C-alpha cells in the first residue's frame, strides 16, 4: 500500500479529538499519529488525505481503516440490508467484507480507539463491527450521507447508532402493533372471502403500512402536529380508510354491496366514483389524549396526481388556519414503487418542497414497494438503484424497511416524523413488501412473474410472522393472537349484516362544513342570477391611488417609475387599462378581508410585462409589492413558480379546495402550455364536483389570441374546455374589457358557491388604446355575460355578428371604418354556462336581421364554434353561418404574412 485515503473530518470526531490532544501535547498521541499530524492541519478540513505508510505505525493505519469501515457502513450499508421479504438482494461491489477496509479476522479482538466514533469508546473491532452491522444492515437501511448539512447527518447517525436501529417497544406497544396488523390482514381477507372477484386493490403483503400510519399519528401528535393530510392511490386505500381514517366498515361494505350515496338533489348531477377513489376526513384521539384531524384526498386512477393536490391543501391550511406554522400540519404521500419512479409529477412536487410559494414544512413519503408495476418488473421500471432516488434532489433521507418486520417499520416511521418536525424537510420511507395478487384480485400475476409468485404463495402474511415473534418472546400466547383475529372477524360480520339492511349510503363527510361553511352547491338558477360586484367610486379611486403610488425613499428602475406614473394618470383620465382592472379586483377583494394568491411562471411581472405586481429596486434585490401595502395587503401572495404546469396547477387546485375564501389563481405563461397539466383539468377541475361532491373556485388564466406568434403561442384551446362543459360544472370566459374582467374575478368570491373559472386572457389587447374602462364601468354595473352593440340602431341591423375575445376589436375597426350601421357586433363574454336568456333577448331585439353569424379567429374545428354548433343546433339561437379560419390540426400558422392574410379574410368576409 503506497497511499491511504480518509474522507472528510465531518465523519470523524475521533480524529479531531486526537488532533486537539496532539496540539496540546504531541507526545500524548501515538508516534504514527504524530507523523500524520505533522504534515496535515486537520482543523482546516480536506477532501482527501494522502498518508505515507512509512511514517505511520501499523496500528495507526488500522485505526484509520476502522474509521473507513464505519464511514463505509454509514454510506453504503443500505446496499447490504435484510430488507426484502421475498427476494434475494442484488449483489453490490465492493462488499462489506473486512478485507474491503484493509482489515482481517485477526483484528477482530484488537481494541481500537475508533470506537469513540460510534459511541462505544475504545472497543474491540468485533463490537464496533457488530454495532454498525446492526445499525445499517438489518431490517432498516438508511440513505443519508448525501445530505449536505453536517448537523443533520450527525443527528441521524446519533439516533440510529444509539439504538442500533433496533426498536424498543413495551408489551402494550407491541400488542397495539399486532392489533393494527391484525385488522389490516383480517379486513382484506374478509373482503376477499365475502366479495370474491370484486376489485379492491388490496394491501395484502404490505399490511405493515397500517401500524406505520397509526404510529405516525401517535408520534406526530406528541410532537405538536394537529392535522395530517393524506394522499394515496388505489392500492390499500380501502384499508387506510377503514383502519386509519375511521370510515365505518358498514359504509365500505355497503359500497361492495353496490349501494349508492343518497342523491338528495338530482339537479346537482352527482355521478359518484368507484369506492377506491373516495376521500374522507375524521377526528381521532391518540393514546395520549391529543386530538388529530385526518383528511384523505379523493383521487383518480392517474397515479401520483394527488400529490400536488395534497401539498396545496396543506399549504392553504398553513396560511389560513395555522398562521404560517407548518409544525401543526403535515402531508403524507403514499406512493407505489413504479409510480414514484416513473411519474414526472413526483419530481415536480419534490422540487417544489423548498420553494417559498409551495413549501409545506416537509412531506412524509411512504412507498408501498411491492417490487412490481402492474406486470412490469422493477428492473424495467427505473434506471436508479432505488425507486426513492428522487429523494436525493432535495437531500432528503430515505429509510428502506422490511415490511415483514412491523417493529422496524414503526421505528423507522417514528424517526422520520421526528426528523420532519425538527428540520421541516421531506423524508422517505421505502416499505419493501410484496403484492399477494395481481394488479387487481382478478388478475393473474404468474403470467409474468411465475417464480416470484411461487415464493409469495408460500410466504406467511406479516401478521402471522409478527404473532409468532411475540409468542416466541412470551409477549403474548397463541390464544391471544387467535382471539383478536376472531373478535375482529365477528365484528366485520355484524357490519356486513347491517350493510345489507341499508338501502342507501349516507354522505358522512358533507362538503359544506369547516372552511366551506355558509357556501352551497350551485344550481342552474344560482349561476344565472346576477350578483353585485360593484364597489363605490370613492373606494375605487382611493385604492387606485394607493396601488399606483411608489414610496419616495426607494429607487426604482426608470421605466417602472414611468409605468406607475402612467397608471396614476389613468385616475384623472378616467381610462383604466387591463392591468389596472385586474389589480383593482385584487385590491378591492383584499380590502374586503379576502385572501388573494396568484402563482405561475413569471406572474409577478407578467409574461407580457403588464402586471408588475412585484417590483425589484434598481440598486438591490429588494422587492416592493404595492398590493401588500394597502389594507388587507398581508393576505396578498403572488409567486413566480418553477417551470412546471402539472405540479403547480395541481397545487393551486388543492390550495383553492381548502380555502374557498381565497381568490386562488394559476396563470399559464401562454394558454396552450396548460396542456402539460391536462390531467388536473380532466380529473379534478372539470369533474370533481360530479364524482366526489367537491366544489372548487380555482381561476385559470390562459393567454389566448391569434397574433402571428405561431402554433404554440396562440391558442389556449377554448374548444377543449368547452368540450368538458356540462351541468354547469365550470365557468369559461373570454372578456374584452378591463371592467368586465374586474367583475368576473370579484364574482368568484361574491357568489355563495364556488365553480372553477377558466379565463382566456389577452396579449396584444393589454395595451390596445380602445381596451380601457371608465370609473362608471367598475362602480355602476356588474359582470356582463353578453355585451351588446350600443353604436347601432336595431331597426337598421340586417346582420348580427357574434364573437368573443380579441376578434371583436378587429371587427369593430372595420365596422367603424366602413360605417356599417347595418351590422351589429355582439360579444359573448361568458362562453359557459351559455347565457341563453341574454342571447334570446339579442335575437328579439334585432328582429329585422336575417343573418346571425358566429365569427372567430380560431380554426373552424377549434375555438367556441364546435360547442355552439352543437349547443344551438335546432334551436332559435342556431347561427345561420360561421366565419373562421379553415380547419387545421395546428392552431395557427407560423408565418406572419399568412396570419395577416387569414385575419383580413375573416374580417372582410364578416362584412361582405
Image (tube, rainbow, N blue to C red):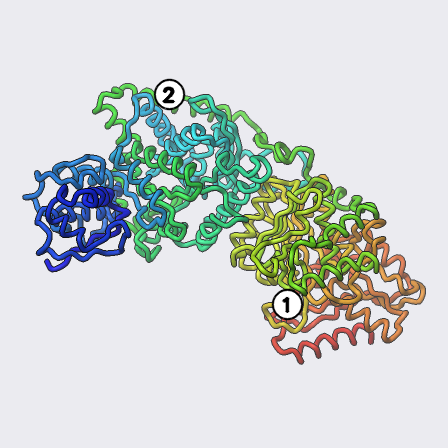
Q: Which residue is mark 1?
A: 714
Tell me the element at label 1.
loop
Number of other residues with Cα within 10 Å of mark 1, as a class: few under 14, some 14 to 19, many 20 or more:
many
Image quarter hosting the N terminus = bottom left
Q: Measuring from the top left, give residue 244's x and y in whole percent.
A: 44, 31
Q: Is residue 852 visible?
A: yes
Quarter where residue 187 is shown = top left
Residue at left 32%, top 33%?
411
The residue mark sitting in front, 2 or 1, is 1
Distance, label 2 to label 1, CA atoms, is: 65 Å
Q: Measuring from the top left, give residue 293's x and y in whole percent.
A: 51, 30
Which residue appears farthest toward the left when viewing the image? 106
Number of other residues with Cα within 10 Å of mark 2, as a class: few under 14, some 14 to 19, many 20 or more:
few
Position of 165 relative to 782 (above/below): above
Q: Is residue 743 visible?
A: no
Q: Measuring from the top left, give residue 724's x and y in whole percent.
A: 63, 54
Q: Nearer the viewer, residue 389 or 895?
A: 389
Mark identifier at residue 487: 2
Q: Are marks 2 and 1 in contact (CB under 8 Å)?
A: no
Residue at left 65%, top 43%?
595
Tell me the element at label 2.
helix
Q: Measuring from the top left, give residue 321's x and y in whole percent.
A: 58, 35
Which residue appears farthest toward the bottom when viewing the image? 897
Residue at left 24%, top 28%?
469
Image quarter hosting the C terminus = bottom right
Amino acid at each position: 500500500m503506497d497511499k491511504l485515503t480518509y474522507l472528510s473530518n465531518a465523519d470523524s470526531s475521533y480524529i479531531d479529538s486526537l488532533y486537539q490532544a496532539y496540539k496540546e501535547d504531541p507526545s500524548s498521541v501515538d508516534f504514527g499519529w504524530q507523523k500524520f499530524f505533522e504534515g496535515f492541519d486537520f482543523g482546516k478540513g480536506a477532501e482527501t488525505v494522502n498518508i505515507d505508510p512509512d511514517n505511520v505505525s501499523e496500528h495507526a493505519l488500522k485505526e484509520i481503516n476502522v474509521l473507513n469501515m464505519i464511514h463505509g457502513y454509514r454510506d453504503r450499508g443500505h446496499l447490504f440490508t435484510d430488507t426484502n421479504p421475498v427476494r434475494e438482494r442484488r449483489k453490490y461491489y465492493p462488499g462489506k467484507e473486512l478485507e474491503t477496509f484493509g482489515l482481517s479476522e485477526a483484528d477482530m479482538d484488537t481494541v481500537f480507539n475508533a470506537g469513540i466514533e460510534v459511541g462505544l469508546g475504545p472497543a474491540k473491532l468485533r463490537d464496533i463491527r457488530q454495532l454498525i452491522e446492526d445499525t445499517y444492515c438489518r431490517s432498516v437501511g438508511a440513505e443519508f450521507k448525501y445530505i449536505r448539512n453536517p448537523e443533520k447527518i450527525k443527528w441521524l447517525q446519533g439516533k440510529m447508532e444509539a439504538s442500533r436501529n433496533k426498536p424498543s417497544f413495551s408489551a402494550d406497544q407491541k400488542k397495539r402493533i399486532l392489533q393494527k396488523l391484525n385488522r389490516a390482514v383480517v379486513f382484506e381477507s374478509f373482503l376477499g372471502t365475502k366479495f370474491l372477484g370484486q376489485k379492491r386493490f388490496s394491501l395484502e403483503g404490505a399490511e405493515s403500512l397500517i401500524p406505520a400510519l397509526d404510529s405516525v399519528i401517535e408520534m406526530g401528535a406528541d410532537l405538536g402536529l394537529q392535522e395530517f393530510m393524506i394522499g394515496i392511490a388505489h392500492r390499500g386505500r380501502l384499508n387506510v380508510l377503514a383502519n386509519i381514517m375511521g370510515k365505518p366498515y358498514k359504509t365500505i361494505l355497503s359500497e361492495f354491496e353496490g349501494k349508492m350515496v343518497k342523491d338528495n338533489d338530482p339537479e346537482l348531477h352527482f355521478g359518484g366514483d368507484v369506492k377506491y377513489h373516495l376521500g374522507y376526513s375524521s377526528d381521532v384521539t391518540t393514546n395520549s389524549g391529543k386530538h388529530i384531524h385526518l383528511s384523505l384526498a379523493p383521487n383518480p386512477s392517474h397515479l401520483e396526481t394527488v400529490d400536488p393536490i395534497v401539498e396545496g391543501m396543506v399549504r392553504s391550511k398553513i396560511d389560513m388556519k395555522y398562521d404560517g406554522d407548518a409544525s401543526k400540519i403535515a402531508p403524507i404521500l403514499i406512493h407505489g414503487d413504479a409510480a414514484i419512479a416513473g411519474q414526472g409529477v413526483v419530481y415536480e412536487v419534490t422540487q417544489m418542497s423548498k420553494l417559498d410559494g409551495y413549501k409545506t414544512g416537509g412531506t412524509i413519503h411512504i412507498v408501498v414497494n411491492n417490487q412490481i408495476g402492474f406486470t412490469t418488473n422493477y428492473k424495467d421500471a427505473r434506471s436508479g438503484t432505488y425507486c426513492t432516488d428522487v429523494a436525493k434532489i432535495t437531500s432528503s433521507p430515505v429509510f428502506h424497511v422490511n415490511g415483514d418486520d412491523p417493529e422496524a417499520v414503526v421505528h423507522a416511521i417514528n424517526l422520520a416524523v421526528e426528523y420532519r418536525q425538527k428540520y421541516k424537510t421531506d423524508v422517505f420511507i421505502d416499505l419493501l413488501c410484496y403484492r399477494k395478487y395481481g394488479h387487481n384480485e382478478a388478475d393473474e400475476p404468474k403470467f409474468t412473474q411465475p417464480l416470484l409468485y411461487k415464493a409469495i404463495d408460500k410466504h406467511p402474511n406479516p401478521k402471522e410472522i409478527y404473532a409468532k415473534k411475540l409468542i416466541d418472546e412470551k409477549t403474548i400466547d397463541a390464544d391471544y393472537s387467535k382471539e383478536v383475529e376472531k373478535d375482529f372477524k365477528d365484528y366485520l360480520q355484524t357490519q356486513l349484516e347491517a350493510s345489507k339492511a341499508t338501502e342507501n349510503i349516507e354522505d358522512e363527510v358533507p362538503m359544506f362544513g369547516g372552511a366551506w361553511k355558509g357556501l352551497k352547491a350551485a344550481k342552474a338558477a344560482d349561476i344565472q342570477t346576477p350578483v353585485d360586484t360593484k364597489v363605490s367610486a370613492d373606494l375605487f379611486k382611493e385604492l387606485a391611488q394607493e396601488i399606483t403610488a411608489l414610496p419616495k425613499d426607494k429607487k426604482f428602475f426608470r421605466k417602472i417609475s414611468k409605468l406607475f406614473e402612467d397608471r396614476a394618470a389613468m385616475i384623472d383620465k378616467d381610462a383604466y387599462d387591463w392591468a389596472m382592472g385586474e389589480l383593482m379586483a385584487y385590491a378591492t377583494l383584499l380590502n374586503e378581508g379576502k385572501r388573494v394568491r396568484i402563482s405561475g411562471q413569471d406572474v409577478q411581472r407578467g409574461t407580457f410585462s403588464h402586471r408588475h405586481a412585484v417590483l425589484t429596486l434598481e440598486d438591490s434585490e429588494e422587492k416592493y409589492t404595492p398590493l401588500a401595502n394597502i389594507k388587507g395587503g398581508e393576505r396578498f401572495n403572488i409567486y413566480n413558480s418553477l417551470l412546471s404546469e402539472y405540479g403547480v396547477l395541481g397545487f393551486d387546485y388543492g390550495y383553492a379546495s381548502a380555502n374557498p375564501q381565497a381568490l386562488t389563481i394559476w396563470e399559464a405563461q401562454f394558454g396552450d402550455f396548460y396542456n402539460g397539466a391536462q390531467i388536473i383539468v380532466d380529473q379534478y377541475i372539470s369533474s370533481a364536483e360530479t364524482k366526489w361532491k367537491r366544489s372548487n373556485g380555482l381561476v385559470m388564466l390562459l393567454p389566448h389570441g391569434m397574433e402571428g406568434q405561431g402554433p404554440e403561442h396562440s391558442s389556449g384551446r377554448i374548444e377543449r374546455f368547452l368540450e368538458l362543459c356540462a351541468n354547469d360544472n365550470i365557468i369559461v370566459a373570454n372578456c374584452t374589457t378591463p371592467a368586465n374582467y374586474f367583475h368576473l374575478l370579484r364574482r368568484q368570491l361574491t357568489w355563495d358557491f364556488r365553480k372553477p373559472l377558466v379565463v382566456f386572457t389577452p396579449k396584444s389587447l393589454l395595451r390596445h388604446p380602445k381596451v380601457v374602462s371608465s370609473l362608471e364601468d367598475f362602480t355602476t354595473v356588474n359582470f356582463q355575460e353578453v355585451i351588446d352593440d350600443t353604436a347601432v340602431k336595431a331597426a337598421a341591423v340586417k346582420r348580427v355578428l357574434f364573437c368573443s375575445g380579441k376578434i371583436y376589436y378587429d371587427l369593430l375597426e372595420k365596422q367603424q371604418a366602413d360605417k356599417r350601421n347595418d351590422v351589429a357586433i355582439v360579444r359573448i363574454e361568458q362562453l359557459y354556462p351559455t347565457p341563453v336568456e341574454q342571447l334570446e333577448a339579442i335575437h328579439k331585439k334585432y328582429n329585422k336581421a336575417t343573418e346571425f353569424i358566429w365569427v372567430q379567429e380560431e380554426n373552424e374545428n377549434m375555438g367556441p364554434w364546435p360547442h355552439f354548433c352543437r349547443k344551438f343546433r335546432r334551436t332559435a339561437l342556431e347561427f345561420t353561418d360561421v366565419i373562421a379560419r379553415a380547419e387545421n390540426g395546428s392552431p395557427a400558422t407560423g408565418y406572419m404574412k399568412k396570419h395577416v392574410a387569414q385575419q383580413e379574410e375573416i374580417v372582410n368576409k364578416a362584412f361582405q
